[in-house]
């Protein structure tokens, strides 16, 4: 059954506040480091707003951890078998992005698997990776995806696999007409 979305978001808000405090950063300092307004951070930590994918991406980059690891930190320790119903699912309704943690991060493992679904017309840009040199193997299962890694733009069709190390910006665009569904294998450097 996975965690209730409201409970997951409340735990996520608490974990984000905890990470900031562990570093001894004021809201002002984190706002500058992440390029996010202080008021947005304050409302996010109080659980008044839900984070978008881009906002979570900026915060994860400021804290130097992959988004999946942050999401795993608010979930209980994953067992070896991760039944479909217990895979954490996170939706960013604003950008039309759904992210399923098929194989959540585990302290003893270097890899993880996520499934992404982008609605037609969705366009998500990330300024930088949470961890430099993160290895990605993206396998497009359905639909079409335009993926820009650094300065290189790739048009993927079903069955295509793009392998890359992430050092800079990336952008995911679904040109449509259908939803794009893909699997990403992520390996920590």
Image (cartoon, rainbow, N blue to C red):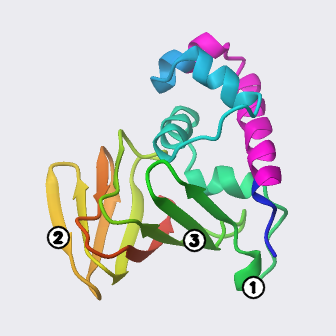
Q: Residues within 10 Å of mark 1 (few under 14, many from 20)?
A: few
* Rendering coords of residue 184 (x, y %): 45, 72
Q: Which residue is mark 2?
A: 155
Residue plotted at (66% across, 34% down) = 49
Q: Nearer the viewer, mark 3 or mark 2?
A: 2
Q: Which residue of the protein is positioned furthest toward the front in this rendering?
A: 177
Q: Which residue is mark 3?
A: 112
Q: Is residue 124 left or right of residue 97?
A: left
Q: Is residue 17 magenta?
A: yes
| Most common SS among magenta residues | helix
> Viewer-proximal residue, 142 or 171?
142
Q: Residues within 10 Å of mark 3 (few under 14, many from 20)?
A: some
Looking at the image, is 161 positioned above or below residue 170?
below
Label 3: element kind: strand
Q: Are marks 3 and 2 in contact (CB under 8 Å)?
A: no
Q: Does 106 sit left or right of 75 as displayed?
A: left
**Direction from residue 76 to residue 175 in the image, left or right:** left
**Mark nearer the N terminus (2 vs 1):** 1
Tell me which segment is drawn in magenta: 6-30
> Along the line of sight, which residue is nearer the eye, 167 or 119?
119
Q: Is residue 64 left or right of residue 160?
A: right
For disc 2, the neighbor class at 10 Å (few under 14, some 14 to 19, many from 20) is some
- Residue 89 belongs to the span the image colors magenta: no
- The part of the image, by quadrant, that contains residue 157 is bottom left
From mark 3 to mark 2, how far is it between C-alphas? Answer: 24 Å
Residue at which label 1 appears: 83
Q: Quadrant of the N terminus?
A: bottom right
* Closer to the eye: label 1 or 3: 1
């Amino acid at each position: 059954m996975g965690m209730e979305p409201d409970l997951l978001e409340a735990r996520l808000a608490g974990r984000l506040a905890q990470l900031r405090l562990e570093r001894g950063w004021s809201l002002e300092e984190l706002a500058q480091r992440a390029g996010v307004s202080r008021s947005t951070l304050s409302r996010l930590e109080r659980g008044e707003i839900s984070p978008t994918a881009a906002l979570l991406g900026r915060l994860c980059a400021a804290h130097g951890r992959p988004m999946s690891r942050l999401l795993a930190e608010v979930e209980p320790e994953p067992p070896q078998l991760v039944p479909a119903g217990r895979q954490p699912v996170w939706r960013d309704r604003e950008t039309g992005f759904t992210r399923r943690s098929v194989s959540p991060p585990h302290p003893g493992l270097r890899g993880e698997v996520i499934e992404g679904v982008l609605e037609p017309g969705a366009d998500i840009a990330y300024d930088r990776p949470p961890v430099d040199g993160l290895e990605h193997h993206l396998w497009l299962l359905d639909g079409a995806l335009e993926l820009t890694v650094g300065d290189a733009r790739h048009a993927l069709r079903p069955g295509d696999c793009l392998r890359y190390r992430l050092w800079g910006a990336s952008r995911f665009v679904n040109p449509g007409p259908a939803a794009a569904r893909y699997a990403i294998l992520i390996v920590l450097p």
